[in-house]
Image (tube, grey):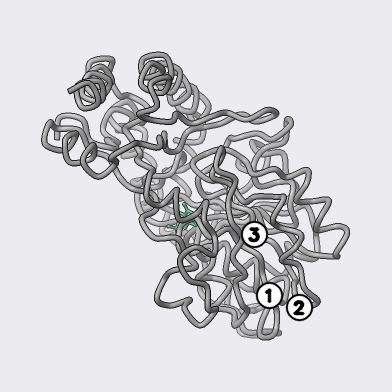
Amino acid sequence: MKTPLLDLQPIHKIIREELRQAVLRVLDSNQFIGGPEIDNFEREIASYCGVKHAVGVSSGTDALLISLMALNVGPGAEVIVPAYTFFSTAGSVRRVGAEPIFCDIDPVTFNIDVKKLENLVSPKTRAIIPVHLFGQCARMGEIMAIAKRHGLYVIEDAAQAIGAKYKGNMAGVIGTTGCLSFFPSKNLGGIGDGGLVMTNDDTIYDLLVSLRQHGATQRYFHNRIGGNFRLDAIQAAALRIKLKRLDEWSNMRRQNAIYYKQSLKDLESNGFIKLPVESQGNFHVYNQFVIRAGNRDALQSYLSDNGVGTAIYYPLPLHLQECFKEAGLTRGALPESEIAADETLAIPIFPGLTQEQMNLVVTLCHRFYEK
Ligand SMILES: *Cc1c(COP(=O)(O)O)cnc(C)c1O
């Protein structure tokens, strides 16, 4: 692949020595679980995002799971989630024994459609999990207003959106809790798995800290059932180095997005593709640059044959997944999620993508539609 969908080498090359030192520092400290790297990283993330508490956990998926556990969402409860997102947004709801209720998406932003959300609230609803998909926040103003009217928790799935802003607030600090992922392909990626939960609520914070350590309040004394949901010190040490450069890298993603939008706009005017939109009040951090493409699968093969990596996020909406079929939703139930699954294609946007690589993508897209 001449132009992969994601290449971490350009940014890792710059910080390679710092990362090596950080890993060795942890190795020499003998503190692999807990300790100062974790404490410092949590403080630094809380300060970066502007939130009172940050709790490092083992993955973004576990951040969602532990949030639901801390809020005591379990059997008999319903949680509203978008149908078009990564699996774990809904998987975590089912894992605590609650039912995910699927909401359709807004076709412009791909985020949960706030006009369709309130109709799904029932007496069993306990929480909403909006997802800030591809690096742009969902309409948190409306979502918080609906939650307030019905007494619901809001768990922000900000796995793809660290550093994104909604009306000046950072993604993940508006809801009851906010969940981050440090999976290597996320904007702040570790050198392995990792995640984090943010909250401004002291009681929820205490619960999160206990739940990530088997529900203990004091070692070997368990008030509740938790799990091993800890972030490792090596990840925290590596992430601290990357956090210092996150804004620079987000800006590089935004610059790449501007270039694509200029260079592909004629294909949009001719009706071949639709470009992503930064909606009003949002600061988009482009974890993915996702277009809608006519003849999508053929475009994807053509790009691949010519050395450009792409991906489909996501090919099957969650309400049509085998594991959620008891909910009884069939094709046609959530049309915008289904259309998105058929039309979307993510093209390379990573920081360090060269002008030459972007030109190749742009040229190939033109060649494909103009032949
Ligand atoms: C990546 C991702 C997750 C899960 O994060 P992991 O760290 O991979 O467990 C959850 N939700 C969304 C929207 C994601 O993109």
* Picture disc at residue 78: 1
Mark 1: secondary structure: strand
Q: Quadrant of residue 120?
A: bottom right
Question: What residue is shown with label 2?
Answer: 124
Q: Nearer the viewer, residue 82 or 6?
A: 82
Who's the residue at 74% across and 31% down the image?
Answer: 167
**Residue 351 in view in this figure:** yes
The amino acid type found where label 3 is placed reads Ile
Residue denoted by label 3: 129
242 or 340: nearer the viewer: 340
The answer to which image quadrant residue 146 occupies is bottom right
Q: Residue at x 35, y 36 (%)?
A: 293
Image quadrant assignment for residue 10: top left
At label 2, the amino acid type is Lys
Within 10 Å of disc 2 (Cα), the crowding (few <14, some 14-19, many 20+) is few
- Residue 159 place in picture, x, y as percent: 52, 50
Quadrant of the snapshot with the C terminus? top left
User: Is 278 or 233 nearer to us in this picture?
Assistant: 278
Label 3 CB sits under 8 Å from any ligand 1 atom: no
Mark 2 CB within 8 Å of ligand 1: no
